[in-house]
Amino acid sequence: MEFKRVVVTGLGALTPIGNTVSDYWNGLINGVSGAALIKSFDTEKFKTKFACEVKGFDADGFLGRKDARKLDPFVQYALFSTEEAVKDAGLDFSKLDTSRIGVIWGSGIGGLKTFLDEVMTFAKGDGSPRFNPFFIPKMIADIAPGHISIKYGLRGPNFTTVSACASSNNSLIDSFNYIRLGKANMFISGGSEAIINEAGIGGFNAMHALSTRNDDPATASRPFDLDRDGFVAGEGAGTIILEELEHAKARGAKIYAEMIGGGMSADAYHMTAPHPDGLGAAFVMRAALEDANLKPADIDYVNVHGTSTPIGDPQEIKAIQDVFGDDIYRINISSTKSMTGHLLGAAGAVEAIASILALKHGIIPPTINHFTDDPAFDPKINFTFNTAQKRDINIVQSNGFGFGGHNASVIFKKYED
């Protein structure tokens, strides 16, 4: 069977370092940190008092106050980034077969803020079950693609991928597979997350997963640095329009890049810790390379999962060394989480956007906040520390790993007709 080719024709982003794709990209290449003291709730009694929050997002202005109240922030974010992507792709759905356009969306947690608010209200009451009628439809993780499809009248496949921090890489892979198998012409794909609230920060603090560098939030996300002490929570959304090549050409679409492969695997090891030998990470990168019919030598840049955790970073590098061998010294590696924080279920989408824009512009975004070399890492590896680097880029790979041992890796290349 001959697969259809799949291209990227639209991008949208709402991130802690920019509320549009262009602002996000400018923040990345200029090494801007999105971390600051949390403003959305009182952190006095919390071990971690900072995060990478979205800034200046006006849900009421975007949706209207009445509609905004019906939606959890993770859905608000999804609709916002998708509107930018739809405009960017020049889509007029009235002229397209919407039965062959779907939405596959990633979210690791879904409506956590809604769940927290409703349970807290109930706990403060007299025991009467006075819940908001929008409680359940605001909270469920699959509601984001539902609202996107309703807004645009899209009747193709519609669901949410939930695989923790690999969720939106999984959404991209599923969308890619539907299109290349001829099951659809286009997907709105990506992910969103909104967990910067008492439950989200408190829960990750209880796991000892978050950085507690409260005296210097802007430099707290330190992937591959000797003094890294945990990840920095982020929030936001990223949307990617994936489209069958001939469909895109027929409507005169601009093309950012071609998606050529994706891999998925499981560590089958531990609830939260990665495999100590990086086996799942190595397997998923090899699976993506095989799917794309590539060799490690074909990759120019790897946007790594790179969360800034003491145990996670070494395992990923061990896996890359295993897969790439001496080619590791030729490629660039960087973790854009050093700037955005960790967007959990949205991480794969916003990092795929960073990878696609790196292809387009020939610039590798940096891994900022590097101060002290960790002797655990080979000093000849190019982590793109602190400053963006220009280079010719033809193919990029982007990794996402999640609690439960879920791994997903995607590959994009420069488009050639």
Image: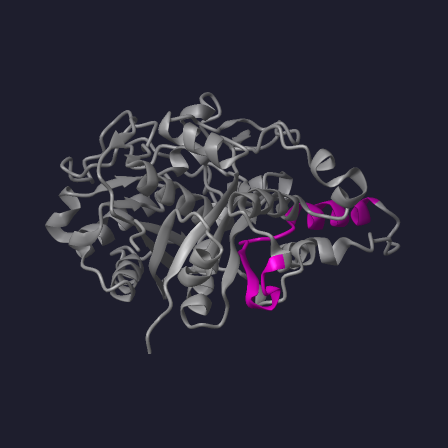
Image height check: is 85 above or below 322? above
Q: Position of residue 37 (x, y in %)?
A: 55, 25
Residue 32 appears anywhere in the view: yes
Image height check: is 243 above or below 330? below
Q: Is residue 20 left or right of residue 5?
A: right
Residue furthest bottom as drawn: 1
Q: Position of residue 125 (x, y in %)?
A: 86, 46
Q: Is residue 199 left or right of residue 334?
A: right
Q: Nearer the viewer, residue 258 or 374?
A: 258
Q: Magenta includes 115?
A: yes
Residue at x 62%, y 60% (from the top left corner): 142
> Which quadrant does the C terminus fall into?
bottom left
Residue at x 48%, y 37% (from the top left corner): 21
Residue 211 appears anywhere in the view: no
Q: Which residues are magenta?
A: 95-124
Q: Magenta includes 111?
A: yes
